[in-house]
Image (cartoon, rainbow, N blue to C red):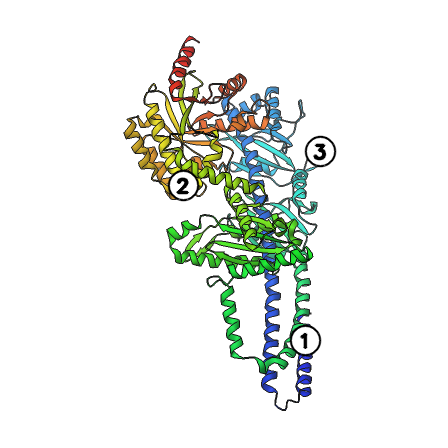
Amino acid sequence: MLSSLRTKVRSQLGDGLRSIGQSLGWRSGAPIVLSACLVSATVTVGTAALVWQARDRAETEAGYQLRGLAQVMGDQVDRWFQSVQLLQQIVVQHAETVQMDSVGAVKERGSSEPWHLKLKEWSSFFPDIAVLFIIDSEGNVVNNSAKWPFGPMNLAERDYFAEVRRRNDIPYYVGRPVIDKITGKWMVFISRRLASATGDFIGCVTVGVTISNLEAFYQDVKIDDRMAIALFRRDGVLLARYPQHESALGVVNASSEGVFRRFSTSSLVTSRMKSLIDGEDRYITAKISSRFPLVVSVSRSSDAVLAPWKHEAAQMIAVAAVMDLCVAIATALSLRRIRARDRLANAESYLARHDALTGLANRLNFNEFMTRQITRHKIDGGDAMLLLLDLDRFKEVNDTLGHGVGDQLLQAVATRLGKMLSSDIFLARLGGDEFAFVTGSERHQDVGALASLILQTLSEPFSVASNEIVVEASIGVVFISQCDGDAETILRRADLALYAAKDSGKNNFKSYCPEMEQGLRFRRELEVELRHALTRGELELAFQPLLHLSSGQISGCEALIRWKHPVRGYIPPSEFIPVAEETGLIGTIGEWVLKTACKAAVSWPPHIKVAVNLSPIQFRTRDIVSEVRAAIAESEIAADRIELEITESALIDDSKLTEVALFELRSLGVSIVLDDFGTGYSSLNYLRKYPFQKIKIDRSFVGEIETSQDCLTIVEITLLLAKRLDLLITAEGVETVEQLNLLKALGCTQAQGYLISRPLSAACILDFVRTQSGNAQAA
């Protein structure tokens, strides 16, 4: 189709040019005709390039979509199988506790009604799991979570039993899908090996899940009718799929195994191939689980992916045909009037309106464009949307890798943004690491999707001068209809929204609202006053005691900063700490808190520790190790009485500088505490990688521990994890006796909250400790 249309266009173009030459009386018009043909050829070649770029863009966008969904589904499968492992681990640990460690013990003790009740209780915590079995060494089901009493059942021929009995090198095995004998439904069973102290096979713990549950979840997340989501074993056996395809369930597909083997466990690769299940030509992304022998594939038919491109290509070719004719006519009429002076003027105009580094429109070009948009809005009400983007922590790239690498990174960012954005979006670089996007009002409803797509596009690592650089960005959004001023007013309000996006955690976007003006004024006032707060003695420390649950004694106090403003009264830390972090004042304030807390704690009984919170900014901008060492020397406090609390946000950059600082601090003798565990990224890798001695469970879980089974389960699992890793546990936000007793029964180490004491001044803390100690001795 494309080839025949191009041929027709060239034929019509040649006839038109010859007619024009004859009508003008050109006896020797070959040079002019040749120039016109060259221009026409350029249009044709350019159109062809744009057509294939559009195809690449369609395939790239499909790849982004499929990889994003495959990543989400792969993570969901990992979490689901982790829950299965956790359930099996609970059963195995209980079996070890009751000494069910032989073939006879499995048959005798495992077949009791109490064991049935335990299995039923444990499986109830995992609603997606249909049944939980204990199977003896001969394949007989000795107990289950579904029914009591139950008839004899032998599963020796099932692969999920035979494989764990035959092989002692695998802890668990995912079986092929089978039709359940009782329900008649397709199910998948996962078995974990039970072994004696000598490693002999004595049975297995098997979990069953109904395939329809997995497929129902896939149905909920499916984007359109031409998309398919499937779950395979690594050897190619299909476990579940939506849309359903029962004839393929449990079938070993050698081609699938070969395809999956091409990818590493961390790959997210999109390929075009014929579907191994329904035979349809598809774009397929496979997510290989790094922890389980499983593969999640997300695919979309090639017809659905390329349909918008085909429509766009037809439009571009039609436009190119018209342009070719127009170019030919314009060239014939005006070629003699083109002068070198005009070409030079055009070049100068381009350079004056485009950024020399990236080739994008510059601030002058942006202002002119915005002025036109404002005029159009005033005349016909047409609206436009401005997205202002700023790279987060770009200064660190210049400081650590040099300005040359920083310039190359800006060029790479501009190139990637230009490829990602559609042609109707105006893109400019305003200076430094700041970019602006302007698009029409028809995208009002898509502001979230567009901003998210931009952030996702930039999140892919950049390879610059042999350096792999990960970029994050913040975006502020404003509409022309929200502003009555000029381009600078619109830009200032977009900057306010950008400021709010950075203030809320960065790597996200915020839309402008009038309240931001007031918030900015308040923040600027707060910044000025905060700079004088230390010198004026307005900052104070309060100390909240930590109760050791087994002894009933106060074992430590957390230092909490307070700002007693002479006019505003007490200002919460949640308002002034972010200002301090952004302005860099947190370093000076943090050093004051550390030294003041240590000096106060010297007068306490020697068994009471002092806990001090550290900001992530202090690790990046201060020599925190030297500051802690100086505080110890000045106060003459024992290092092992100091606890330094950090949140997960200090660790997410995986900075080598942070890692080195934590180990140096630990070598001084101080304790390192992970604060607010469970509310942020909660990577278990942190507990393995960094030298923590304690975890603090966030108050959001403790507050609902009596009423929410989910919160109770999270606290129980966290306590079990801490016990295995030999870590202490402090529960924050304890406010009732019932919460305290439950935490004590679960084995929690310390409790902190209003039930024990509100934060006290340094003058009152000693009296409270003495009173609490006397009460504990009397009890």
Whether 751 is drawn above or below 297: the answer is: above
The Cα atoms of the two marked residues, 1 and 2, are separated by 64 Å
Q: Residue 9 at what x, y percent from top left?
A: 68, 75
Which callout, 3 or 2, points to the residue nearer the camera?
Answer: 2
Whether 327 is drawn above or below 451: the answer is: below
Q: Nearer the viewer, residue 435 or 483?
A: 483
Q: Which residue is mark 3?
A: 183
Which amino acid lies under the numbered mark 3 shown in the image of this protein?
Thr
Disc 2 residue crowd, few under 14, some 14–19, many 20+, Cα 10 Å: some
Give SS at disc 2. Answer: loop
Q: Which residue is mark 1?
A: 9
Q: If you read the primary sequence from the N terminus, does the residue marked by circle 3 or circle 2 appear first?
A: 3
Which amino acid lies under the numbered mark 1 shown in the image of this protein?
Val
Give SS at disc 3. Answer: loop
Which amino acid lies under the numbered mark 2 shown in the image of this protein?
Gly
Report the residue that reaches farthest toward the right.
Answer: 184
Whether 402 is drawn above or below 24: the answer is: above
Q: Which mark is residue 584?
A: 2
Quarter holding the C terminus?
A: top left
Quadrant hosting residue 27: bottom right
> What residue is shown at x 40% (from left), y 30% (from top)?
539
Whether 718 is drawn above or below 51: the answer is: above
Q: From where the camera sits, is residue 305 visible?
A: no
Q: Residue 491 at what x, y percent from top left?
A: 54, 52
Q: If you read the primary sequence from the N terminus, does the residue marked by circle 3 or circle 1 appear first?
A: 1
Q: If you read the primary sequence from the N terminus, does the residue marked by circle 1 or circle 2 appear first?
A: 1
Give SS at disc 1. Answer: helix
Q: Nearer the viewer, residue 636 or 4?
A: 636
Q: From where the camera sits, is residue 732 visible?
A: yes
Q: Which mark is residue 436?
A: none
